[in-house]
Amino acid sequence: MPKDANKQTKSSKDKRHFFKDFKAELKKVIWPTPKQLVNNTIAVITIVLITAVIVFVLDLTFESINTYGINKLKSAIESSQNETTTNSTSEEQNAIENNENNVNENQTAEGQEAGNVTEENGQE
C-alpha cells in the first residue's frame, strides 16, 4: 500500500508543478495591446477577403474557359463523328461495289474457264 500512496502524492505534486510552470510561462508571454490586436485583426481579415476575391475571379475565369473549351471539343467531336459516318458510309458503298465487281469478274472468269473446258473437251 505504501507504493500506491507514494504514487498518488507524486502524481499530485507533478500536477501542481505542471500548473505552476504553466502559469510562470504565461507570465513571460508579451501580450498585444488592444490597439495591436485591432490592427492585426484588421490585417488578417483584409488579407482573407483579398484572397477570397482572387480565388473567386480565378474560378469564374477558369469556368468560362472550361465551358468554352468543352463546347468547342463537343463540336469538334460531333463534326469528326459526322465525317467518320460519311466516310464509313462511302467506304461501305465502295466495298459493296468492289464485292460486286469481284463477283462479276469471278462469274466472267468461271464462264470463260467453262468455255475453255468445253472447247478442250470438243478438241479431244
Image (cartoon, helix red, strand yellow):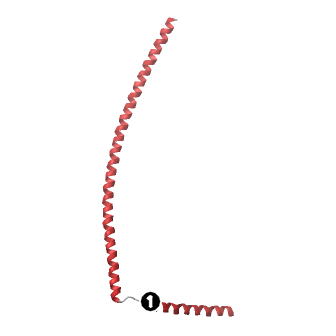
**Residue 83 quadrant:** top left
Question: Percent from the top left, x then y, of residue 67?
Answer: 32, 57
Q: Residue at x 60, y 90 (%)?
A: 11
- In the image shown, does 46 or 15 lie closer to the viewer? 46
Q: Residue at x 37, y 37 (%)?
A: 88
Is 39 on the left-hand or right-hand side of 28? left
Q: Residue furthest right?
A: 1
- Dividing the image into 4 quarters, which one contains the N terminus? bottom right
Q: Residue at x 32, y 54 (%)?
A: 69
Seen in the picture, residue 45 relative to 96 is either above or below; the reply is below
**Residue 42 quadrant:** bottom left
User: Looking at the picture, which amino acid does disc 1 mark?
Assistant: Val
Question: Percent from the top left, x then y, of residue 51?
Answer: 34, 72
Q: Residue at x 43, y 20 (%)?
A: 107
Element marked by disc 1: loop
**Residue 37 quadrant:** bottom left
- In the image shown, does 10 or 109 lie closer to the viewer? 10
Question: Percent from the top left, x then y, of residue 7?
Answer: 64, 91
Seen in the picture, residue 118 relative to 99 is either above or below; the reply is above
Residue position for label 1: 29
Seen in the picture, residue 25 relative to 63 is either above or below; the reply is below
Question: Percent from the top left, x then y, of residue 9?
Answer: 62, 94
Is 7 on the left-hand or right-hand side of 90? right
Seen in the picture, residue 23 relative to 121 is either above or below; the reply is below
Give the number of marks. 1
Around disc 1, counting alpha carbons within 10 Å, would you say few (fewer than 14), some (14 to 19), or many (20 or more)? few
- In the image shown, does 3 or 40 lie closer to the viewer? 40
